[in-house]
Amino acid sequence: MVLVNAVRDYINRILQDISGMKILILDSATVSIVSVAYSQSELLQKEVFLVEFVDSISMSKEPMSHLKAVYFLRPTSENIQLMRRQLAKPRFGEYHLFFSNMLKDTQLHILADSDEHEIVRQVQEFFADFVALDPFHFTLNIASNQMYMLPAVVDPSSLLHFCERVVDGIAALFLALKRRPIIRYSRTSDISKRIAQEAAKLMYQQESGLFDFRRTEVTPLLLVIDRRDDPVTPLLNQWTYQAMVHELIGIQDNKVDLRNTGKFPKDQQEVVLSSEQDAFFKANMYENFGDIGMNIKRMVDDFQQIAKSNQNIQTVDDMAKFVDNYPQYRKMHGNVSKHVTLVTEMSKIVEERKLMLVSEVEQELACNGGQGAAFEAVTNLLNNDSVSDIDRLRLVMLYALRYEKESPVQLMQLFNKLASRSPKYKPGLVQFLLKQAGVDKRTGDLYGNRDLLNIARNMARGLKGVENVYTQHQPLLFHIMESITKGRLRDVDYPFVGNHFQQGRLQEVVIFIVGGTTYEESRAVALQNTTNSGIRFILGGSAVLNSKRFLKDLEEAQRIARTTTGLV
């Protein structure tokens, strides 16, 4: 529960010491941070009667002196200016200001100078500057996520902004955990190196006092890696519950928006998928799609049993019992229909897009050799009218990443076929991916074919066969965690920053993926944490990807690179 609890603890401390009726005022980033950790009913219990955005509060003039205003904002210059204007014409009885990260001295002076009416009761820093999606998975929800793919010369100020946001998020995480890490990064990635060095500068020089926790445990490790080291994982179809919902429908801040997918009752147009609030989801979020269907059927059967006993109300005692159990019954009813709806919707998409066929070829491309058979399988699917444009594009990309050096002629044939079958995809996007994340650009052994040990392991796995052809892929992150657990992560591939090196056996590792994480990777982390290796892993990233978001970032980066420099 480590990350979710850290954020909940901060929000509890913000709300519990301020008695009376409150309005909670958030910005577009902190609304995500709060909403994944705290439900609306929990906010009501803390006497929060209104939740508003800081910019919309500026629009209204109506005085509400009976309410205490509790602000929880990121310490950005825009937010400080909004605060300055709001303090000049106060609408609320008291102002309690909380910021999700370190305030600069100049910002503090601006706030102090603006408080002419002396209504600010407190200003504090509470380091919840990350969105804690699951106990071991956090994200920063950076909208301009494509920046990590662009060279610094293209748009220096946007890249600076991107790096600062990542460093802020990483710093807040370690302040929340009360630790200062040693730092390593992916050798071939300029942006990973830049972020690692900036984080080290902040923690060991600029704010060394703040990060000096004088703890006796072994120092944790922060490993900063680049999404482009493993471009395969975000391109694959998923077949475990949480990852599959995100791939086929989309999850944002643990919520699934079903408004565009079909006719659903009003209370089911947006549903919450949180391992903290939903016991069925917690038990099944990493299970295979086939098993989910069986488990939901069991849940429906249990519910029908309860519903049947509720219909059998004959005495006043029966009635009283039903009324007592009604909230639980109602909650169970909502939960059953939510999961039935999601699985039904996904089954429909799998059938429409022939994803069983597509996914089998994807997994072959990601996990097994055999270029001739792969070319034939991809060609057949490109010719299949039932296969959607986005699936054709992903298949060609997966083939290109695997065989870019081995079969340039056949690769050109696939490019031409893709252009004729799916003209909506501009030519050059696959080449741009190879330029970004081709074999010469990557750190690590993505396909397990560079290193003798990995080649032997893959052969052994090939002989044993796989349990499930659709989930045989393991992300590069899995192999990185394995190397860390065995003390074999190579310094030459993942150098240390500065002169802080590993001493003693690691107990905690935070892996940050610049460019975004996937739910397949967060599943690998959660499963790794159950193996009793003695190391606790935490995963974070600049965004949470599915194939749609990864391709959108790629297209946007290509567009910016073209228009600004003619680089592509």
Image: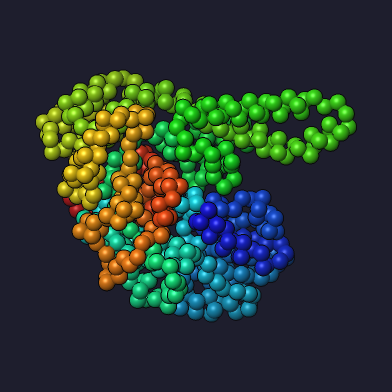
Percent across and percent down for residue 24 are 62, 60
> Which percent across, then down, holds residue 345?
50, 28
How are the residues colored?
A: rainbow
Q: How many marks?
A: 0
The percent coordinates of residue 122 (x first, y second) are: 60, 74
274 left or right, relative to 504: right
Instruction: Pick the residue in front: 235 or 56.
Output: 235
Can residue 562 be seen here? The reply is: no
Instruction: Please give the name of the residue rendered at 45% of the width and 62% of the height, measured from the top-left corner.
Output: 173
Q: Where 100 falls versus 104 (above or below)?
A: above
Q: Quadrant of residue 26?
A: bottom right
Residue 520 versus residue 142 in the image, above or below: above
Relative to 372, 37 lies left or right? right
Q: Compared to 563, does 448 lie above or below? A: above
> Is 401 left or right of 37, judged from the image as shown?
left
* Vertical arrangement, residue 254 with respect to residue 365, above or below: below
Whether residue 304 appears in this view of the structure is yes
> Between residues 44 and 143, which one lies in front from this camera angle?
44
Residue closer to the observer: 417 or 524:
524
Q: Residue at x 56, y 29 (%)?
A: 296
> Percent x, y for residue 278?
59, 42
User: Hey, which residue is sitting farthest right in the picture?
Assistant: 316
Q: Residue furthest left?
A: 409
x 43%, y 38%: residue: 243
Q: Quadrant of residue 459?
A: top left
> Would you identify the image quadrant in which residue 300 lies?
top right
Q: Name which residue lies at 71% across and 66% down.
A: 19
